[in-house]
Image (cartoon, rainbow, N blue to C red):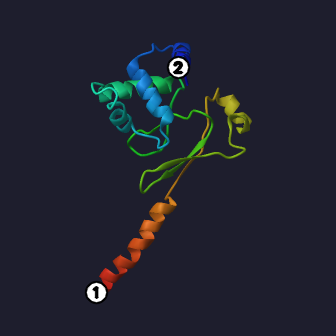
Amino acid sequence: MSMETLKELFAQSGLKFTTQRYLVYKAMTTARDHPSAEAVWRRVREAAPAISLDTVYRTLASLEQRGLVSRVPGAGEEGRFDGDVTPHHHLVCLSCGGIEDFTMPGAALDDLPPSVAAWGVPRDAQILVRGVCRACLGRMQAAKPQQNQRSHTK
């Protein structure tokens, strides 16, 4: 996205263009790991050493309020954010905290039942799948034989 396009996007969203907002937004749109505010702050500090963690939190909240980033629900106590605001869903590992995107047909706003329209006006919808990823399952399986060996030697 060109600088002019980004300035226009910010203006349309009611945001003044600042270097700090630009850096936070750029960090979010290039991240694929659904970073926390602290992780964004660490990344942005390379280009803007004086930026505070509070500024990153406030910037993320402002971008979220305007639909330019989203918060991943149910991703633990630490807030995690997503710079991809296209419709998609999330897989959250309860062991390592990893988050992955996925899509599936039949799970978009247009697919919601009529009762949702009676409720009000939904802005977005997503499915959140929480469980344990394959990498963590593999580590758990690898640790089991070691635990069994220790219990037999006692």
Q: Amino acid at mark 2?
A: Leu
Q: Residue at x 36, y 35 (%)?
A: 43
Q: Amino acid at mark 1?
A: Thr
* Front position among marks 2 and 1: 2
- Residue 97 shows up from this direction: yes
Q: Disc 2 on helix, strand or loop?
A: helix
Q: Is residue 66 above or below residue 95?
A: above
Q: Residue at x 68, y 38 (%)?
A: 108
- Tell me which corner region of the image, top left, top right, bottom left or bottom right, holds residue 47: top left
> Could you tell me residue 42's position as x and y percent?
33, 36
Q: Which numbered dot is residue 153?
A: 1
> Could you tell me residue 37's position as x and y percent?
38, 35
> Could you tell me residue 13's position as x and y percent?
54, 16
Give the residue at mark 2. 6
Q: Residue at x 42, y 57 (%)?
A: 95
Within-10-Å neighbours for mark 2: few <14, some 14–19, many 20+: some
Q: Is residue 39 above or below residue 11?
A: below
